[in-house]
Amino acid sequence: MKKLKRSARLVEMTQYLLSRPHTLISLTAFADRYQSAKSSISEDLAIIKEVFEGEGIGELHTLAGAAGGVRFIPMCRKDQALDRIGGICRQLEQPDRLLAGGYLYMTDLLGQPALLQEVGLMFATAFAGRDIDAIMTVETKGIPLAHATSLYLNVPVVIVRRDHKVTEGSVVSINYVSGSNKRIQTMSLARRALREQSRVLIIDDFMKAGGTIQGMVDLLHEFRAVVAGVGVFVESGEVDNEERLLHDYISLARLTEVDLKSRHITVQPGNFFKEERT
């Protein structure tokens, strides 16, 4: 790269960091890239760090030593996230979203790039310190949420199938009991999709009793993998605590009331925002 003026270098460095989240970049790499002294690079990074953290864009972590450098950790401020999730809750409360069984129609929302970016950043913030190797979800509506989150955590996405595909090669399959209707169902994952002993974040779009997520947890055991966390876009608040199969999770929204006759729906911020509501 040709030598840039400082103002141009600051812009390019910012973009470089934003496009490489959770990646350690050495000062030497920056110095070579911009043909500048390490002292100048350090000053630039101090400016970027101040702006990132002051504006709630994320954190810039510095690691000292010969193998050190800087790592950008994307994060959103809780107050900003709470304001945005409030708007999402209002959209979810539209009466025509109500489906049989108390489920909500969310496919249109999960197709909006801006909304997915915001939700992905919320999940990335919630699990920023979990040392995650991969994100797991089950087809199909959890896929865009998992990919949105993976962009900020910079880890691969692993997709669990309900039906075995010949293009997946050898697979590991398990039976699980659906938490909502108590039916026995099957899910599978290609053996090549996940390394053993990986630390995995599970992301799902909707959780009622938690049967599907518990199935993914059991499937991870077959790979000797570790569940690093569970993130749910919307959870149902109408399930008794005794019926819920999963208790350690983070939700962004909570479906608290559904009246099928009047088609009245109430959706509130999830447990990720619990501290802001107390």
Image: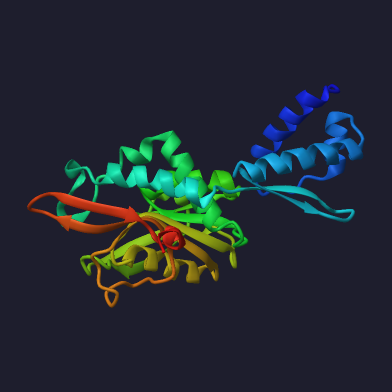
Say whether residue 146 is visible: no
Horizontal placement of 182 versus 40: left or right? left
Horizontal placement of 154 versus 102: left or right? right
Q: In which quarter of the image is the C terminus?
A: bottom left
Determine whether 50 is above or below 230 in the image: above
Residue shown at 9% from the left, 50% from the top = 262
How many dots with numbers? Answer: 0
Residue shown at 27% from the left, 68% from the top = 179
Determine whether 181 is above or below 61 in the image: below
Say whether residue 51 is visible: yes
Determine whether 56 is above or below 210 in the image: above
The one of 228 and 264 positioned closer to us in this rendering:
264
The one of 172 and 274 positioned closer to us in this rendering:
274
The one of 256 and 235 positioned closer to us in this rendering:
256
Question: Which color scheme is applied?
Answer: rainbow
Where in the figure is residue 254, as x and y percent of width and height?
A: 32, 57
| Picture quadrant where residue 13 is located | top right
Residue shown at 65% from the left, 43% from the top = 54
| Picture quadrant where residue 243 is located | bottom left
* Outermost left residue: 261
Determine whether 133 is above or below 242 in the image: above
Q: Quadrant of the N terminus?
A: top right
Residue shown at 85% from the left, 54% from the top = 67
* Outermost bottom residue: 242
Where in the figure is residue 217, as x and y percent of width and height?
A: 44, 68
* Outermost front residue: 278
Where in the figure is residue 187, as x and y percent of width and height?
A: 36, 61
| Picture quadrant where residue 256 is located | bottom left
